[in-house]
Amino acid sequence: MSSQQDKVYIEIIRELNHIIQEDNLKAGDKLPSERELSERLNVGRSSVREALRSLELLDLIETRRGEGTFIKTVGGHRLVEVLASFFLREKKAKSDLAETRKIVEVEALRLACERIDEEQLKRLAELIEKSKISWQQGCFPVEEDYSFHKTIVEACQNRLLLNIWISLVEYSKVALRESLSREGRPEQSIAEHEKIYVALQNRNEECAINALKNHLKNSRF
């Protein structure tokens, strides 16, 4: 594939993500037809076909004879993760994502300091312990990390903030794994979670926010 063809291919995948967002498509939903995608993207059908074939080889979409092409139901978020691997190569995209996440999560934490309940505090403590166990077993605690932050945002009791946060962080799970793969980072991240947890437990808004800001800065995303 030539350099020019590669650019077209990447752009089609990029625009396909926009279409998924615009049409509010989810795992299990049908994608627009090859012809419709060609018209909407103003590219040849052969180029669209190649992009779709590549996504199918990655097990992200499936073609059903006589029915069309569908986003895979199992592991549907993988499509977002793979697309993110393209977009998050851009320094500005990473910066915008990190800045927006910080704004949302800090405000959610501020509310959570008032509204978090005992069950949610218990879950945070459990997730910290699970993170330690995962790391001791040689696994990066990506899901535990994600769930820790999600629990805090859930505790703010603002559904809109939660939905915004989920969209942002699902899009950056690739970056989360990369962050935790840095030498010494898993242990440091768990220790930072513990500081956030203690501050929340004590309903100390200032300490909680300072701990979270430090954590996000060290996470580099």
Image: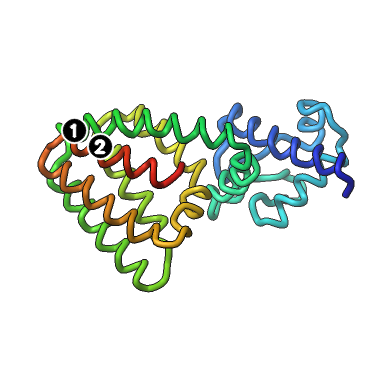
What is the quadrant of residue 20 in the picture? top right
Write the residue at 41% across / 31% down: 164
Q: Secondary structure at mark 2?
A: helix
- The residue most toward the left is 202
Would you name the residue on which mark 2 appears? Answer: 210
Would you name the residue on which mark 1 appears? Answer: 206
Q: Position of residue 147 (x, y in %)?
A: 34, 50
In the rendered view, tell whether residue 167 sits above or below residue 146: above
Q: Is residue 32 left or right of residue 124?
A: right
Q: Are marks 1 and 2 in contact (CB under 8 Å)?
A: yes
Q: Secondary structure at mark 1?
A: helix
For residue 197, the mark is: none
Q: Nearer the viewer, residue 12 or 196?
A: 196
What is the quadrant of residue 103 in the picture? top left
Q: Is residue 32 left or right of residue 87?
A: right
Q: Nearer the viewer, residue 195 or 156?
A: 195
Write the residue at 76% across / 46% down: 66
Q: Amino acid at mark 1?
A: Glu
What is the quadrant of residue 39 in the picture? top right
Write the residue at 55% across / 49% down: 76
Write the residue at 60% across / 47% down: 79
In the rendered view, tell whether residue 98 sits above or below residue 22: below
**Are there few (<14), some (14-19), or many (20+) residues within 10 Å of tag 1?**
few
Q: Is residue 106 left or right of residue 207?
A: right
Q: Position of residue 132 (x, y in %)?
A: 30, 65
Q: Nearer the viewer, residue 80 or 141?
A: 141
Q: Nearer the viewer, residue 220 or 144?
A: 220
**Are there few (<14), some (14-19), or many (20+) residues within 10 Å of tag 2?**
some
Q: Amino acid at mark 2?
A: Asn
Q: Position of residue 171 (x, y in %)?
A: 51, 41
